[in-house]
Image (tube, rainbow, N blue to C red):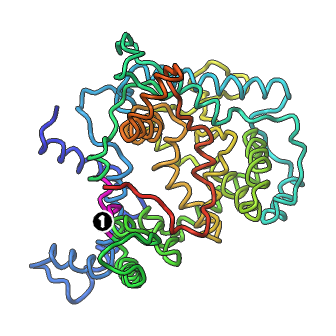
């Protein structure tokens, strides 16, 4: 264990190292050099004057937002002697299960590749490049023959893997007792109890205002809404990511939601971001990947058949095809229990120096993957902005929905175990009665279709939303 001072020093060093060499770092450095020619910068107070200039010109706020982003994305520093694989996932049986799951995915992809005689990647002919360029904004009108292609896996397959997880060190002799785990997911992971949930989500208590919920509070709903919107506009004007995240805990006004989410994620859609998106677009036009067919197939099977999302079909293709080429996504594997899949250059199979990550972003799409993007299409009508927000959401949150991990934010702990434990606590007598009368040993709380339920479009009447009660 590290003491608090050592951990803080390591955290600072880690963030400094991460920010060095970034576009923000070079911009701040350039601004600091240019301001030296300004008359208000004095030699005797050089350090303070430069700092004041950066603060007044907004660069200090941008740096704060970048640091805040790193604090939320990167895991806390571990002891220097900790092996890298333990940093990604501390539990050996979880690492083993994740590795086995990855082999299963790769086997499915390679089998399909071999059966269909389709290469993993190929350069598009000039005519095909021109056609794709011309119909980039109308890809939904294309009807390729995808009947031979099948999804690599579906969420229910991943659920079956979670159900089969077992800790080899856990004593299972009490399996039929009241102390056993009654849900389908049988891994003994620590989850929040009700007092901890109340503390973590204190803004949801009945005495606090929450936008869109008409519970009895000391402030009338209409008055709270107008004041909340006023504060929201002020938060946006300050461009403070930490303040925006705290503000959103009491609800995001519909008209401010897009800007608030972008601010929380520190997704600015700068000219550099637009350029990066266009470079990815060029990569899609120049090369065809096997995973492109999986993306087409998934969008056709899910969003295209949805009453709410079918209008965003073109956006989904644009974002997901670019996402598959984005090597910047690989950074998240430093704190993800998963490992990016690799392939070999033709004729060099087995030679590690000729191994390449495939697809370039390290993420193989599955059935339902497009539903991660679909809800965001309601908020952002510019593809580059939509892409930047989705990528940031993925590397922060979405990757946990299809990775096997003991993380408190992982699917094994939350929501699977959390929901089941809370259900047993709140309805203890009912669950016990069900066991005794029906002879049920492990009644299952199925969390299938997790991706679909997360992306489901909410009804317009949200006055009946339920909150964690005191």
296 drawn magenta: no
Task: Using the image, determine if residue 33 lies above or below residue 166.
Answer: below
Residue 335 visible? The answer is: no
Camera-side residue of 127 and 88 = 88
Farthest-out residue, front: 437
Give the magenta-colored segment's residue range: 200-208
Residue at 71% x, 25% y is 108
Residue 211: percent from the left, percent from the top? 43, 72
Q: Residue at x 57, y 51 (%)?
A: 454
Left or right of residue 12, residue 374 in this image: right
Residue 196 location (% of width, % of height)? 27, 46
Pick whichever, 124 or 72, lies toward us: 72
**Quarter of the C terminus within the rendering:** bottom left
Whole-percent x, y for residue 238 in the image: 34, 79
Question: Against 177, is 225 above or below?
Answer: below
Can residue 6 be seen here? Answer: yes
**Residue pictured at 47% horizontal, 37% vertical:** 416
Q: Residue furthest bottom?
A: 39
């Amino acid at each position: 264990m590290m003491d608090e001072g050592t951990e803080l020093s390591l955290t600072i060093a880690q963030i400094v190292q991460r920010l060095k060499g970034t576009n923000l770092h070079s911009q701040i450095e350039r601004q600091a050099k240019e301001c030296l020619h300004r008359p208000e910068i004095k030699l005797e107070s050089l350090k303070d004057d430069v700092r004041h200039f950066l603060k007044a010109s907004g660069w200090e706020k941008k740096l704060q937002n970048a640091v805040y982003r790193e604090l939320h994305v990167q895991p806390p520093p571990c002891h220097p002697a900790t092996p890298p694989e333990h940093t990604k996932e501390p539990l050996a049986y979880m690492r083993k299960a994740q590795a086995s799951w990855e082999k299963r995915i790769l086997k499915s992809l390679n089998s399909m590749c071999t059966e269909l005689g389709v290469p993993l990647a190929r350069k598009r002919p000039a005519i095909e490049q021109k056609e794709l360029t011309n119909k980039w904004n109308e890809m939904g009108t294309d009807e390729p023959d995808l009947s031979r292609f099948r999804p690599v896996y579906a969420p229910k397959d991943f659920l079956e893997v979670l159900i089969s997880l077992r800790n080899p060190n856990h004593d299972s002799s009490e399996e039929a007792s009241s102390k056993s785990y009654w849900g389908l997911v049988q891994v003994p992971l620590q989850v929040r109890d009700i007092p901890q949930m109340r503390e973590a989500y204190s803004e949801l208590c009945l005495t606090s205002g929450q936008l869109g919920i008409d519970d009895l509070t000391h402030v009338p709903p209409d008055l709270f809404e107008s004041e909340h919107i006023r504060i929201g506009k002020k938060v946006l004007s300050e461009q403070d990511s930490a303040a925006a995240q705290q503000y959103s805990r009491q609800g995001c006004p519909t008209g401010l939601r897009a800007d608030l989410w972008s601010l929380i994620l520190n997704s600015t859609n700068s000219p550099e971001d637009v350029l990066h998106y266009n470079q990815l677009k060029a990569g899609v036009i120049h090369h065809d990947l096997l995973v492109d067919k999986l993306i087409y197939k998934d969008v056709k099977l899910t969003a295209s058949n949805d009453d709410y999302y079918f209008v965003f079909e073109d956006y989904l293709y644009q974002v997901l095809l670019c996402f598959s080429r984005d090597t910047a996504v690989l950074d998240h594997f430093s704190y993800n229990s998963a490992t990016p899949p690799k392939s070999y250059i033709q004729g060099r199979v087995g030679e590690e120096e000729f191994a390449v990550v495939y697809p370039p972003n390290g993420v193989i799409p599955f059935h339902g993957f497009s539903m991660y993007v679909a809800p965001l299409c309601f908020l952002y009508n510019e593809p580059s902005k939509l892409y930047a927000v989705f990528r940031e959401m993925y590397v922060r949150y979405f990757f946990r929905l299809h990775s096997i991990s003991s993380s408190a934010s992982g699917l094994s702990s939350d929501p699977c175990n959390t929901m089941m434990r809370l259900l047993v606590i709140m309805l203890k007598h009912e669950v016990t009665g069900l066991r005794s009368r029906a002879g049920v040993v492990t009644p299952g709380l199925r969390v299938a279709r997790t991706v679909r339920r997360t992306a489901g479009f909410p009804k317009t009447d949200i006055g009946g939303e339920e909150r964690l009660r005191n």
